[in-house]
Amino acid sequence: MRHVPVLLKEVIEIFNPQPGQIYIDATVGEGGHAKEILKRISPGGVLVGLDWDPNVLEKLKSELLSPEGKVILLNTNYTAMEEMVEKQKLDNVDGILFDLGFGTHTLQDSGRGFSFQREEPLDMRYNPSATSITASDVLNRYSEKDLEKIFKEYGEERFSWRIARGVVTARGNRKIETTGQFVQIIKENVPARFLRQKLHPATRVFQALRIFVNQELSNLRITLPQALNILKPGGKIIVISFHSLEDRLVKIFFKEEKIKKELNIITPKPVTTSIEEIRGNPASSSAKLRAAIKIANN
């Protein structure tokens, strides 16, 4: 499956990249947005791509090339963005992009259990060398109450308590180590009518477990103020989220910084994907884009 960057047209229109400018793609992934930005900031521009997954960056190195623009690819969590900018001696950053979805490589080729449609070890760490706890660890060690909270809070799963109880019962007989085991537990603990619906019954629970293992919400909470510090006056920040909790976090941050007169909000309401884009890329249907511009200091 080919990776399709979500809301690419809208990202380019809002940023309006120009030759010589500096942009940071904080979640560069497979480089869909980054490639288009790089075209427009060359010659003389600088594109910094960050990603937590080292395998993604290795693949991207051969694809993200420009004879006229500088490309810096770094294997790091975006929570280290401010430190990275200092080390690279970058200033006057014109734009920062966060695409909080995850690419086809991570879903299909990582072998770490992100997809409930593949039989794989339940790992779910973006960077196994940087994070110690795996999805399997969580399922086998956490209490029923804590599991219910994870499934409900991060996945908004209506049957969180039933699934949590099913996990605890199942692990009493056999350690839960694979995606197939976990999917079977989920199916056994949701009402039969939900097994026939369009949304797979494992979708929300797998999402919740991934978000928890990688601490995605707390990482976003840490990095948004850093992004504001890094941007030059007039610089823009764009966040594309796929989960209501992520979107709410970004919305609140933008509003608070607007009150402080640090940001102007470009998108009063989130930008969503068109029917045409959803047809070509069904995974984009839940995407919400919010953007803001840093106010010049008086």
Image: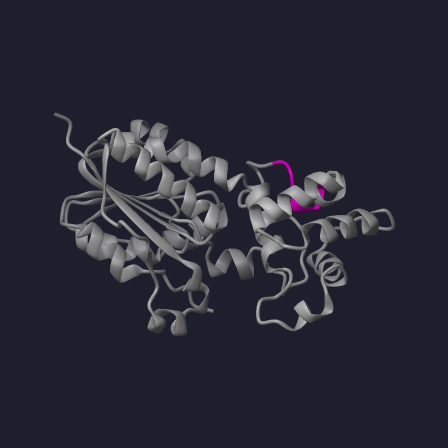
Q: Nearer the viewer, residue 266 or 25?
A: 266
Q: Residue at x 69, y 71 (%)?
A: 193
Q: Is residue 35 above or below residue 81?
A: below
Q: Is residue 263 above or below residue 11?
A: above
Q: Is residue 139 left or right of residue 224?
A: right
Residue 150 falls inside the magenta stretch: no
Q: Residue at x 12, y 25 (%)?
A: 298
Residue 74 visible in the current orientation: no
Q: Residue at x 57, y 38 (%)?
A: 129
Q: Is residue 180 above or below residue 88?
A: below
Query: Where does the image place residue 255, in percent across and percent down from the top left?
Result: 31, 38
Q: Residue at x 38, y 49 (%)?
A: 28
Q: Nearer the viewer, residue 145 or 138?
A: 145
Residue 136 falls inside the magenta stretch: yes
Query: Where does the image place residue 29, in percent across and percent down from the top left?
Result: 41, 52
Span shown in magenta: 132-137
Please name the colour scheme applied to the rendered image: one colour
